[in-house]
Amino acid sequence: MALRTSPEVGGMGHSIKRKEDPRFIRGKGTYVDDVELPGMLYLDIVRSPHAHAKIKTIDIAKAMAVPGVLAVITGQDLAKYNLHWMPTLMSDTQMVLPVEKVMYQAQEVAGVLATSRYAAADGMAAVEVEYEPLPVVVDPKKALLPGAPVLRTDKKDKKDNHIWHWEWGDKAATDRTFAEAGVTVKQDIYIPRIHVSSIETCGCVAHFDKVNDKLTVWMTTQAPHAIRTVFALVAGHVGLAEHKIRIISPDIGGGFGGKVPVYPGYVIAVAASVLTGKPVKWIEDRMENLQADSFARDYHITAELAAKKDGTLTGLRIKTLADHGYTDAAANPSKFPAGLFHVCTGSYDLKAAHVEVDGVYTNKPPGGIAYRCSFRVTEAVHTIERMVDLMAHQLGMDAAEFRMKNFVKPEQFPYRSALGWEYDSGNYGAALQKAMDRVGYAELKREQAEKRKRGELMGIGISSFTEIVGAGPSKHFDILGLKMFDSCEIRIHPTGKAIARFGTKSQGQGHETTYAQILAEELGIPAKDIQVEEGDTDTAPYGLGTYASRSTPVAGAAAAMAARKIQDKARKIAAHLLEAAPEDLVWEPGKFSVKGAPDTFKTIQDIAFAAYTNHPQGMEAGLEAVSYYDPPNLTYPFGSYIAVVDIDKGTGEVKIRRFVAVDDCGNIINPMIVEGQIHGGLTMGLAPALYEEITYDEIGNIQGGSFIDYLVPTAVETPNWETDKTCTPSPHHPLGAKGVGESATVGAPVAIANAVVDALWHLGVRHVDIPITPPKIWRLLRDKGVNE
Ligand code: CDP
């Protein structure tokens, strides 16, 4: 994209430094735990050691005797106000605090309120709960067997652990492609339960001001407006009306989807503040965060792919069990219980596809959150990219050549997929070719052949993913009925400086910089002169928040549209000042000049001043605009990643020698920020590929509840990412931009998995589930007779 503004103005395409960084690198950010209010109380939470157990008694006497402890809040207390249960984002129900039984290990059992954090922790340890263990269901397959204990006994008519069945696509047509196929492949794929592990855990400070009847909550939330509405709907009957609720989402240390749900701790803190009239702070510790907050993935997939003998792909068939824990608390758009999993035909021109997903209850924490992912697109990409690789290997074709043959071609866009999505634009072959050139694909293939002769294990893995971001067109996308538009409100001050507020909320992505750049591009006001604010429901326009890489596609577009409204009014003011007809003026970022007389002009700063001092008679004063943008379509960023791995035969360790990532997110606002997003995303993709997984033993004990055994990669494990790009603008986005935040997390794990299988294919290995740990590979090699 050609630059239209100078580096001083800093519009689109300039790698200007992040405006938020001076406060972050000086340790001057304001996170929830930095909020201190006079008279503040502290909340700690008693959690269940059992995965499924009746609560017989809760004895609070010893806790109440701890100096500083003021109250212990139980489910019985909340039940008096009908606040012991609350809705999930998928219209299921979840407990705030239990009255009868607990359903997963680390579930909230009671809240302890005290004058200091330490007293609250001591009080928490002194609460005595008597449990009666119940049979535990951990495996979703066993959960569906006849005779399995029914977990949701609170649902009167529920006779099993099945939550919902959802299917999409043309089953008959898909079955026909399989009946007529020259070759088919079938594979079970498990995408394990993982956790976002953001640097900052969750927490809030709730302050109910009894004088003004106003509740203010500083809260780690990615979607403050939606939270305000949910609070008003759930607690309206106890007097919390929406105009009396203010949610402030201050600086956030990483969200990645984990800070979209409403956790019980938030609600207990609010209830405690409403009851006491005092501010109440609740901050999770790391183990609570890892053990009890919403998880991601946990999809048990069986996939089949059909092709003609010449390697032309024809059909895809998928059946999946989605383990949702004890409640379906996924943050999906309501129409799609399996999120956007049905983008699983990926980058390939398949004629028919059919997907079935069944949601299942187990004794685990709730979830199905979109971990840096557009509502299950990671699961979709992992499946199709694994299957395409399997088919290429099965046919004895080169994996890159096979993809090139089957890609949706540039001239097919806009392209309607077999499962109904309309892809906006793409050039998949160009991205893959660039990645191949960059990595030296042909030379690597030669090296691999040589090494194989010597018995060395080297693999080359490709992932050519298509993403789907920017939820969304409101005709298809809502959360709890709230349509998924987003917003921007701009006010230009008389001296030509501006403030812009948004319905989204950055968690580290750099919105204060990139939104200012969009406005700089559209208005010619330097980005440094534009203050961007998000996250305060009393000031920002209503929006659905930041997750699933929707900020640029939706709120970024709202910024451009609001700026264009300002430009329209500015033209009229300029015409008045220049004594010319509005249509005789020419706009370039930052000024209107008279057609044919480029030296006769007014700058946006002149116009801003005139908007308050010398505006035309009959025109309202001021220069401001708001846009609520409802995108006509999603955006479909894409990329091709190539991983080169060497496997140590002695230890089973997978070493990533090279990783080349070519991304395409259309027009780029800030190349440096996009590169940072991709670096971070790739590392978050490496994590589940090789290290991270949460498992449970047969009685529901979490195995991975601390960083001792939940292995988040550090700089030591992280390879040198080599990044590059192609640019295929979105035809419907006002700036031609697509989202990018999650692309790398979505695309990276399967490139690594494919590289590992490629290294082991000649030994008869067809698939390895992630995380690909040294013991897993070591055992495989032992079984294949490669090591002892
Ligand atoms: O919703 P979220 O901010 O997580 O994701 P995003 O819209 O993909 O944006 C992530 C960051 O990359 C933001 O600072 C964007 O403004 C920036 N970005 C960009 O500079 N150019 C693009 N084409 C897409 C995103």
Image: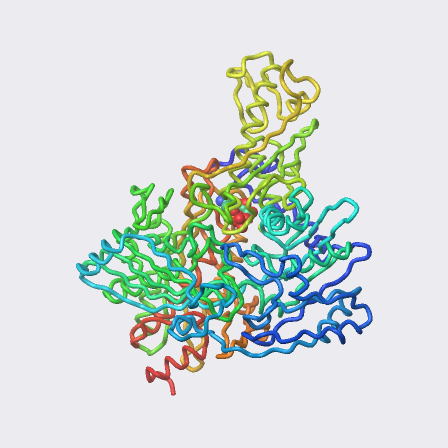
Residue at the limit of the structure toward the bottom, as seen here: 788
Image height of 2 relative to 716, above or below:
above
In the picture provided, is 633 more to the left or to the right than 265?
A: left
Residue 538 picture location, percent across and down: 67, 41
Which residue occupies 26% across, 57% down? Answer: 315
Asked if 215 appears above or below 161 in the picture, the reply is above
Q: Position of residue 451 (x, y in %)?
A: 34, 74
Image coords of residue 560 (percent x, y):
53, 34
Q: Compared to 50, does 7 lie above or below? A: above
Position of 609 compared to 64: left or right? left
* Res. 36 image quadrant: bottom right
Residue at the limit of the structure toward the top, as seen here: 579
Marker count (numbered):
0
Query: From the viewer's perspective, is 446 left or right of 328?
Result: left
Q: In this view, does 453 lie to the left or right of 505?
A: left
Residue 17 visible somewhere in the drawing: yes
Between 116 and 5, the one nearer to me in the picture? 116
Q: In which quarter of the image is the C terminus?
A: bottom left
- Please tell me whether residue 200 is drawn above or below residue 702 in the rendered image: above
How has the structure been colored for display?
rainbow
Residue 292's x, y, as percent?
Answer: 58, 67
Q: Is residue 437 visible?
A: no
Depth check: 131 or 648 in front?
131
